[in-house]
Amino acid sequence: MALIDVIVSDITQETPTIKSIRLEKPDGSPLGTYLPGAHIDVEGPTAITRQYSLCSTPDSADSFAFAVKREANSRGGSAALHELAVGDRLRISEPRNLLGIATDARHHVLVAAGIGITPMLSMARYMDVHDISFELHYFARTEAEAAFLPLLNDRCPEKLHAHIGVSRDSQEQVLDAAFTTLSAGTHVYTCGPDGFMDKVVAVAGRHVSPDAVHLENFHAAEQPDAAENAAFEVELEGETYEIPADKSIVDVLQENGCDVDTSCQEGICGTCIMQVLEGSPEHRDNVLTKAEKESGEVMAVCVSRTKSPRLVLDYY
């Protein structure tokens, strides 16, 4: 996937561990608008590429902004981004959406924890400006650790429910109370730590259809050892390729000159999703929804494999 050059135009220390970074084009031309909930690939100073949700105003074309939490066990990605200065250059992808606003929903419930507020912020900003019915539930350990809380209190206080200092054991009770009064046609969106999102999905499932629950996850699923894999065949545009146990579908396709874009190579960004025309995928990603996986019509070819001896794929 082609990356574009951008320059860091502003940096804000949102919390002791979270910085927001604003980006503009070097020549000052507009970066363009994007759909709320979108994310970008960011190639940092150490050439490590990571995915970050955009948290700026989707309708504003002049710049993009994303937030990054400095992780204690960072492998160089978040630490390097925290060392950026205004004027530094980065490379980013075009925005793309895995978490979008359901157009048929009558009401939207956004649920965020920690750094998971970033995609919810862009969605809340968009829905507030466009008079779309929503509420935002924001969980944080302390006010000091709740990035963008002052902004949300200023812009949409009547739609914000800040749950500060709620223990993990009490989160389910708080969520259940929030979801009990949901009306028909409500959709739920969540982003945050894996365990938190699992809890939101489980509780929301008691009140709304599973198809009405949406999540964004930038944590890779643990993959089985290659020794547990079996070889199989993939057909693409009339050509058949052998996929050995120790190689991914995308590795083999790219080695043979097929034009398949990749980014994370971990099943979390959605860049490599392809159509499945025949066969039964064995999904190992953290990007497709439950409904998409159950349909068997698409798959992330960087990590997923197959339950059948053969797959027939097409570009998505």
Image (cartoon, rainbow, N blue to C red):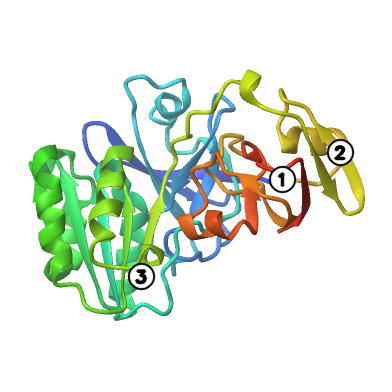
Q: Amino acid at mark 1?
A: Asp
Q: Residues within 10 Å of mark 1 (few under 14, many from 20)?
A: some
Q: Given contact means CB atoms under 8 Å apart, are the residues at marks 1 and 3 in contact? A: no
Give the left or right position of residue 202, taking residue 101 as reference: left
- 260 w.r.t. 121: above or below: above
Q: Position of residue 216 (x, y in %)?
A: 41, 50
Q: Residues within 10 Å of mark 3 (few under 14, many from 20)?
A: many
Q: Given contact means CB atoms under 8 Å apart, are the residues at marks 3 and 2 in contact? A: no
Whichever of labels 1 and 3 marks the residue nearer the N terminus, that label is: 3
Q: Which residue is mark 3?
A: 126
Q: Residues within 10 Å of mark 2 (few under 14, many from 20)?
A: some
Q: Is residue 262 visible?
A: yes
Please name whichever residue, 22 or 149, is drawn nearer the observer in this view of the structure.
149
Residue shown at 26% from the left, 31% from the top? 17
| Number of numbered markers | 3
Quadrant assignment, res 210: bottom left
Give the left or right position of residue 244, taking residue 111 as reference: right
Please name whichever residue, 69 or 181, is drawn nearer the observer in this view of the structure.
181
Residue shown at 49% from the left, 60% from the top? 291
In this rendering, the label closer to the viewer, 3 or 2: 2
Q: Looking at the rendered structure, which numbered label has been put on residue 241?
A: 2
Residue shown at 44% from the left, 70% from the top? 59
- 210 w.r.t. 251: above or below: below
Distance in Å between CA atoms under marks 3 and 2? 45 Å
Q: Which residue is mark 1?
A: 261
Q: Secondary structure at mark 2?
A: strand
Instruction: Return the residue found at the far right.
Output: 238
